Amino acid sequence: MTTAQIAPEAQQKKKKKTPFREWLDSVLFAVVAATIIRWLFFSAFVIPTPSMENSLLVGDYLFVSRLHYGTTTPVTPLQIPLSHQTVWGTNIPSYLDWIKLSQYRLPGFTDVKNGDVVVFYLPVEHPNAYQKYNNVLPDLHPHPIDLRSNYIKRCVGIPGDKLEIRQGRVYVNGAAQALPIRMQNEYFVSTKTAVNEENVFRKNGITDFSQFTETFGDSITSNDEFGYVVKTTAALAEKLKTYDFVKRVEVVFMDKGLKEPYLFPNSDLLDWNKDNYGPLTVPKKGATVPLTEVNIALYGDIIQNYEGNENVALTKDKVTINGKVVADYTFKQDYYFMMGDNRHDSADSRYWGFVPNDHIVGKAVFVWMSIDPNPTSFLRKIRWERIFRIIN
């Protein structure tokens, strides 16, 4: 007689799961599957600010591919699944930093290229750096590297590029770069009189505008020119010129040599602004730079915060690592320069510096849903024309 024949009947039959147990198993499987998919393949992302308008709008929901550049392994494993920074709907941290792992990037099938729309972790949430940028990013808080705030911008400079902005135009290695199709600039629209803002601006998709009087630097009232400052695309700026009450439309740029406050780097040696910036070289792994005063201003934060160096001390003209003054420095990883397509309303690399390679999350692929936060009617709440739009 075999063992199976003498086994008790209770051992031969599988115990039936209760409905609650079946529900719990289903929820657990869904959470595990969603966590793996979110980490390994793609993540959902929503546009919260107008920094990428008119390419991406506030309320656009995106799919972000982690496969393109290769996903990174978790650094902070003790966190609630499918959460980020805080428990949903509260300010309670959703993670514990008792354990920190080394980060590795799995192989991807491409590298970050000039013009890619990239999601990345905001680098200046590093504990040693975040207080420095509170004027630009007032809601900043320090977080572990894999739990820093997700930002989305367009990559305009890859490792080794010599980058410069001249009158709002990006130049890489001396060559002017193609403008994003829906890029926004700031324009002064001179008008003969006040206009119906709903019919002229909002119906043309222009939501950021304000009345403005240009005085031309004198005290003669008759010389003043009434109009509006608007943020819009070049195509819509051309359309505004066709209205009979518009006298002229002119793009607004800051003058070269006019130093802008809170710009990166914070140095009296440089007189850059958002429209006239650089030249600078984007750091590349293995490249060596002499540590002059200007280079210390440009790359000091990198050396101190993102290269894994210990006991780094910075002064205006000197870098000390482990008590030793260094005259030059070789970068240990690649970096990128990111800018928003809404060039006059974007907190980007012009204000807080380079994005390290280990902060890259993925490539924005397409918009799967778009909800207008300020619709003119309920029927216009969903922007149907943007659904499944490829991001370029």
Image (cartoon, helix red, strand yellow):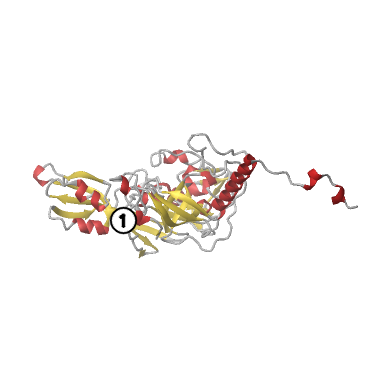
Q: Decide which of 268, 277 is in the foreground and name it.
A: 277
Q: What amino acid is labelled 1 in the image?
A: Gly
| Residue that mark 1 sits on | 168
Q: Which quadrant of the rendered structure holds the C terminus?
A: bottom left
Q: Residue furthest right?
A: 1
**Residue occupying image coordinates x 86% and y 50%:** 5
Q: Decide which of 331, 131 is in the foreground and name it.
A: 131
Q: Decide which of 350, 174 is in the foreground and name it.
A: 350
Q: Position of residue 289 (x, y in %)?
A: 49, 56
Q: Residues within 10 Å of mark 1 (few under 14, many from 20)?
A: some
Is residue 291 visible in the rendered structure shown here? no
* For residue 161, side relative to residue 217 (left or right): right
Q: Position of residue 349 (x, y in %)?
A: 41, 50
Q: Decide which of 49, 300 is in the foreground and name it.
A: 49
Q: Position of residue 355 (x, y in %)?
A: 47, 52
Is residue 359 visible in the rendered structure shown here? yes
* For residue 11, side relative to residue 266 (left or right): right
Q: Position of residue 72 (x, y in %)?
A: 57, 53
User: Circle 1 sits in a helix, a strand or a loop, which is it?
Assistant: loop
**Residue occupying image coordinates x 22% and y 59%:** 238
* For residue 78, side relative to residue 204 (left or right): right
Q: Is residue 368 above or below residue 209?
A: below
